[in-house]
Image (cartoon, rainbow, N blue to C red):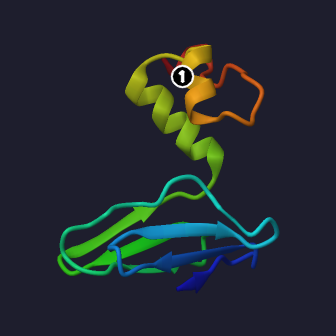
């Protein structure tokens, strides 16, 4: 387990072979867990730059932990904004807003 550099988050590798990130102020898990990984219990560490490092037997996976980085990645992969239905499924407690700048598509 590892605390985020700002002290607001906690990353935990679990016996079900997943990694979860928790918001310590709200005491709620942030999103869905990473994994499960089929090669044993993963290690979870925050790097000084705030990225999450998931350590597995054969290597490691690095994830940015800021929402804007995830939005940019999703826009590049999908090539479009989420539809309002997709938004509602993925972010049910947030008001819909376009996230992809037109020059990123």
In this view, the residue in front, 74 or 26, is 26
Q: Residue at x 74, y 69 (%)?
A: 27
The relative height of residue 45 versus residue 73 in the rendered view (above or below) is: below
Using residue 18 as the reference point, say whether residue 95 is left or right of it.
Answer: right
Q: Position of residue 76 (x, y in %)?
A: 43, 28
Using residue 99 as the reference point, say whether residue 12 is left or right of it.
Answer: left
Determine whether the residue tagged by mark 1 lies in a helix, strand or loop: helix
Q: Position of residue 14 (x, y in %)?
A: 42, 79
In this view, the residue in front, 43 or 94, is 94
Which residue bears the numbered disc 1? 86
Using residue 60 as the reference point, say whether residue 73 is left or right of it.
Answer: right
Q: Residue at x 53, y 57 (%)?
A: 64
Q: Position of residue 42 (x, y in %)?
A: 34, 78
Q: Quadrant of residue 25?
A: bottom right
Q: Residue at x 64, y 42 (%)?
A: 68
In this view, the residue in front, 87 or 66, is 87
Q: Is residue 82 visible?
A: no
Furthest-front residue in view?
A: 16
The relative height of residue 22 versus residue 67 in the rendered view (above or below) is: below
């Amino acid at each position: 387990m590892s605390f985020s550099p700002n002290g607001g988050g906690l990353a935990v590798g679990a016996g079900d072979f997943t990694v979860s990130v928790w918001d310590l102020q709200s005491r709620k898990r942030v999103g869905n867990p990473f994994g499960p990984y089929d090669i044993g219990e993963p290690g979870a560490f925050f790097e000084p730059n705030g990225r999450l490092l998931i350590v597995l037997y054969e290597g490691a996976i690095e994830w940015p932990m800021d929402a804007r980085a995830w939005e940019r990645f999703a826009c590049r992969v999908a090539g479009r904004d989420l539809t309002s239905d997709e938004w509602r499924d993925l972010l049910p407690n947030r008001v819909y807003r376009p996230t992809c700048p037109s020059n990123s598509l």
